[in-house]
Amino acid sequence: MYPDVPDLYRLYVFLVVVEAGSISGAAARLHLSQTAVYQQIRGLERKLGLKLFYRQGGRRVPTEAAEALIGPTRELLAHAERYQGHLETIRGRLGGLLKVGVGVVSAEAFLPRLLAGFRAQSPACSPQMIVGDAVSLAGMLGRGELDLAFLGQQLGGRQVDLDLLFQEELVAVVSDRHPWARRRRLGIADLEQVRLVLPGPGLGTRQTLESALARRGCQLKPDQVWFEGHSLQALAVSLLAEPVVGILPASAAQEIGPQFKILRFGDLNVRQPVFIGRSRALALSPVAAQFYEFVTGPEGQRLLPSPVSDE
């Protein structure tokens, strides 16, 4: 039986309205007029025979029927993207959208290099980076909303295959105006006395630090965390604004600029694994499979971080 499904573009517009929460917000994201977005939604409602949104103040809130359609719609569009990738392969060029999740801060340092190296071989590839915590990214992998993800922790019981790429140590970072700027090392006792800038909960770097401290019978106090950020840039700006201490993977710390000083831990072994993850249930698209082979092969390995020397 031929499936009587709506036009994929209308389904895409539907998801954008859900995410934006309004017709105007969706129109801005899609670079369309509000009238055009409204017509797409009305056409989809007529096709489905369902009311998809109701007004609540200035927002468009999904109806119960729309809520039930969000997950299947995302899965359908993910499969359509894979189909597009197969078409590009058949036409003789490896291309299409490549969605990569980032759940570890150091990926902001090494992922652009990986993508640049890969695109030199596959210029038709269109990469997109999605930042999030490990649990949410694993869920997106399982639903087909991501092709691959770089994660900083194991995820037991998830429908995700993880391959270890490398391990690197975590270090402390301060601005060159910080009282510790002339130091080279610090210990757990030092860490307990300062305010910290950390990646947000659920990111691999944060999990690694907390696990290492727990093994030594220590834990962070809630009032120690001055700022939580999901981006390397936000963490760097925070270190310049206040005399605080950041905890970062060594490769990321080396990327944020000469106005920062790196201190290593003298009495705390803090090494973070970095994994590349993919769905167990869904086959990789051709471009994702090629990128996976690139990352795990010799060319990709040369672009990944190297251990920091003791000097």
Image: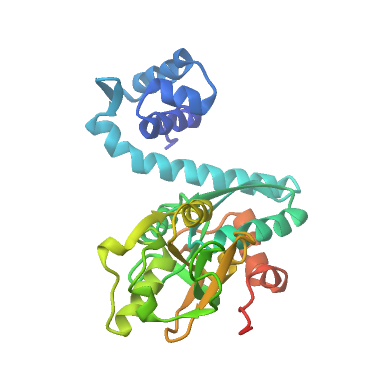
Determine whether 9 is above or below 262 in the image: above
Residue 262 % position (x, y):
56, 71
Q: Is residue 56 left or right of 121 when viewed as pictured?
A: left
Numbered-mark total:
0
Determine whether 63 is above or below 83 in the image: above
Q: Does residue 50 appear in the picture of this structure?
A: no
Residue 6 % position (x, y):
43, 29
Here the colouring is: rainbow
Q: Quadrant of residue 201?
A: bottom left
Closer to the camera in the image, 64 or 212 = 212
Determine whether 156 is above or below 42 in the image: below
Q: Which quadrant, please, contains the C terminus?
A: bottom right
Q: Residue at x 35, y 18 (%)?
A: 46
Q: Is residue 51 left or right of 208 when viewed as pictured?
A: left
Q: Does residue 196 appear in the picture of this structure?
A: yes
Q: Quadrant of residue 66?
A: top left
Q: Residue at x 40, y 39 (%)?
A: 73
Q: Residue at x 50, y 61 (%)?
A: 105
Residue 29 % position (x, y):
50, 28
Q: Quadrant of residue 58?
A: top left
Q: Residue at x 39, y 21 (%)?
A: 23
Q: Which quadrant, please, contains the N terminus?
A: top left
Determine whether 262 is above or below 55 in the image: below
Residue 118 % position (x, y):
71, 58
